[in-house]
Image (cartoon, helix red, strand yellow):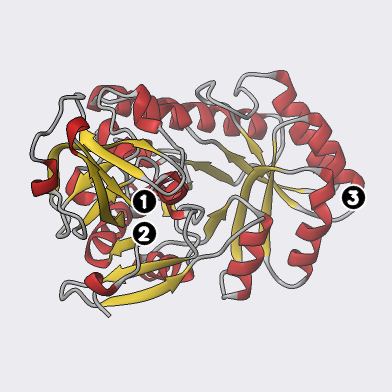
C-alpha cells in the first residue's frame, strides 16, 4: 500500500523523521550522562517503544495501568506509572508486580502514602516533587516531604526516589527561559532528594523530565534519569516552544478535500475534531494554528493555511488571518490530499487505532496502538 491508497483521515508517521527525533533525544541524554526513560503515552505503540529501546532508552513511563500491563506483556518490565496512585489501583499494581513487572508508583500526599503502606505489600514508590507550580507534587522545602518519605520507609514500602515534571516549560518560547526552567527542574528535584537523604531516608533515584527541558538542559548533575514523551513525534506546541521545526514533526493526519465554500475562502476536509482532537494548545501561544497546520500531500507546509475550525467529521481550511482566499478551489481541489500537523501529538494520536507508517519510498505499514484505561 502507498499513501494515495489510504482511507482518510489516517494518522501518518514519517518513520525516518521519527528515528531522527529518537536519535536526537538519546544522543543528548547520553551526552548529559543520564538514562532516558521515554513516556510511551505519546505513541502507545509497541513498535515505537521498541525503536526507542533499541536506540538506548532504559525502561518506560506510562500514564495508565492498562498501558503498564500491555507493555509488560510485550516484554517491557521496568515501568514507572507516573500518575498519583489511588488506593483502588493498588490491587492491579500488586498483581503486575507479582507477575514480575518492576512497576514503580508515585505519591504526593500523606493520604496516598498511608494507603500504600496500609496495603501491606512492599511497593516501590517515588515521591512526586512540584518544581514549577504547574500541577501535582510536594514542594521541595515542605516539611511533609520528609513526613511522606518516613511514612513510606517505616511502613515497609521501598522509597525509590523523587520525580518531577516541569509542565510549565510548555508555556515558554525562548532558549534562555527554557534553559532556566530546565535548571530549576533539576535543582529543585535534586534538593528534595538531598533533604530526604539528610533525614536518613533512602533516595537513590532522581527522575526529571519534559521534552522542552530535556532538550534545553545544560547539565543534569544529581539526576539519574530523564522522562520525555512527545519528542518522538513532536507537534505544533513544541514548534512554538522552540524545540523543533515544522519539518521535524513526524506525526500528521492525512485528509482529503471534500468541498468548498468559495465565497468564504474555505476548503472542507474529512478530518474534523474527531481526527485532530479538540486540543487547541497553540491558542495560548504566539502562533495559533487552529486545529492544525496544513501541508500538501508531500508534507510541505502551505504557508498561511490552517484548519481554522472543525466539526466532528469536517475540518475547515482557510487563511490564518481570516482573509478570503479567492482561488481556494483551484489551490485545493476536491479529491486532493493534505497532511495536517497536530497541535498536540498525544491527543491526535489517541483518535486512531492504527498508524500508517511510511518510509522514504512511500510504502506504508500499519502499526497498532494501545487503547483505553
Instruction: Tell me the residue at 47%/31% (across/down).
Output: 167
Location of residue 209 by image quarter: top left
What x and y, as percent, mark residue 16?
22, 66
Residue 271, disc: 1
N-term mark: 2 or 1: 2
**Between 352 and 243, which is closer to the camera in this rendering?**
352
Whole-angstrom CA distance, mark 3 to mark 2, is: 46 Å
What x and y, as percent, mark residue 110?
80, 30
Location of residue 287 by image quarter: top left
How many residues crowd mark 1 within 10 Å: few (<14), some (14–19), many (20+)?
many
- For the question of whether residue 196 can be seen, the reply is yes
Can you identify the residue that label 2 sits on? 9
**Cβ atoms under marks 2 and 1 closer than 8 Å:** yes
SS for tag 1?
Answer: loop
Question: Which of labels 1 and 3 is toward the front?
Answer: 1
How many residues crowd mark 2 within 10 Å: few (<14), some (14–19), many (20+)?
many
Location of residue 282 by image quarter: top left
Can you identify the residue that label 3 sits on? 119
SS for tag 3?
Answer: helix
The correct choice, above or below, for 357 with respect to 291 in the image is: below
Q: Is residue 199 left or right of residue 114?
A: left
Instruction: Tell me the residue at 31%/52% (across/down).
Output: 25
N-term mark: 1 or 3: 3
Instruction: Tell me the residue at 61%/22% (across/down).
Output: 139
N-term mark: 3 or 2: 2
Q: Is residue 73 left or right of residue 366?
A: right
**Between 314 and 198, which is closer to the camera in this rendering?**
314
- For the question of whether residue 250 can be seen, the reply is no
Amino acid at each position: 500500500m502507498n499513501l494515495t491508497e489510504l482511507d482518510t483521515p489516517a494518522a501518518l508517521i514519517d518513520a525516518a523523521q521519527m528515528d531522527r527525533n529518537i536519535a536526537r533525544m538519546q544522543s543528548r541524554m547520553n551526552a548529559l550522562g543520564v538514562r532516558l526513560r521515554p513516556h510511551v503515552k505519546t505513541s502507545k505503540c509497541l513498535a515505537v517503544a521498541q525503536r526507542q529501546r533499541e536506540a538506548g532508552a532504559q525502561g518506560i513511563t506510562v500514564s495508565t495501568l492498562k498501558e503498564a500491563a500491555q507493555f509488560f506483556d510485550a516484554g517491557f518490565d521496568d515501568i514507572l506509572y507516573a500518575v498519583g496512585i489511588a488506593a483502588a489501583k493498588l490491587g492491579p499494581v500488586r498483581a503486575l508486580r507479582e507477575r514480575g513487572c518492576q512497576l514503580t508508583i508515585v505519591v504526593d500526599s500523606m493520604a496516598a502514602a498511608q494507603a500504600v503502606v496500609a496495603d501491606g505489600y512492599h511497593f516501590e514508590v517515588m515521591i512526586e516533587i512540584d518544581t514549577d507550580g504547574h500541577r501535582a507534587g510536594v514542594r521541595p522545602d515542605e516539611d511533609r516531604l520528609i513526613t511522606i518519605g518516613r511514612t513510606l520507609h517505616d511502613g515497609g514500602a521501598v522509597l525509590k526516589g523523587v520525580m518531577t515534571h516541569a509542565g510549565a516549560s510548555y508555556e515558554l518560547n525562548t532558549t534562555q527561559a527554557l534553559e532556566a526552567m530546565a535548571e530549576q527542574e533539576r535543582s529543585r528535584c535534586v534538593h528534595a532528594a538531598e533533604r530526604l537523604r539528610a533525614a536518613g531516608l533512602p533516595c537513590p533515584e532522581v527522575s526529571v523530565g519534559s521534552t522542552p527541558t530535556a532538550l534545553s538542559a545544560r547539565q543534569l548533575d544529581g539526576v539519574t534519569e530523564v522522562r520525555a514523551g512527545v519528542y518522538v513525534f513532536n507537534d505544533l506546541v513544541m514548534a512554538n516552544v522552540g524545540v523543533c521545526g515544522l519539518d521535524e514533526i513526524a506525526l500528521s493526519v492525512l485528509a482529503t478535500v471534500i468541498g468548498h465554500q468559495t465565497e468564504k475562502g474555505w476548503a472542507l476536509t474529512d478530518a474534523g475534531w474527531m481526527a485532530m482532537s479538540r486540543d487547541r494548545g497553540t491558542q495560548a501561544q504566539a502562533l495559533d494554528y487552529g486545529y492544525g497546520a496544513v501541508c500538501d500531500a508531500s508534507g510541505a507546509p502551505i504557508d498561511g493555511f490552517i484548519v481554522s475550525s472543525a466539526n466532528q467529521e469536517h475540518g475547515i481550511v482557510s487563511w490564518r488571518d481570516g482573509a478570503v482566499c479567492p482561488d481556494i478551489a483551484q489551490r485545493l481541489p476536491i479529491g486532493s490530499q493534505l497532511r495536517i500537523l497536530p497541535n498536540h501529538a498525544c491527543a491526535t494520536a489517541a483518535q486512531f487505532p492504527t498508524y500508517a507508517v511510511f518510509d522514504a519510498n512511500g510504502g506504508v505499514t500499519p502499526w497498532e496502538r494501545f487503547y483505553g484505561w
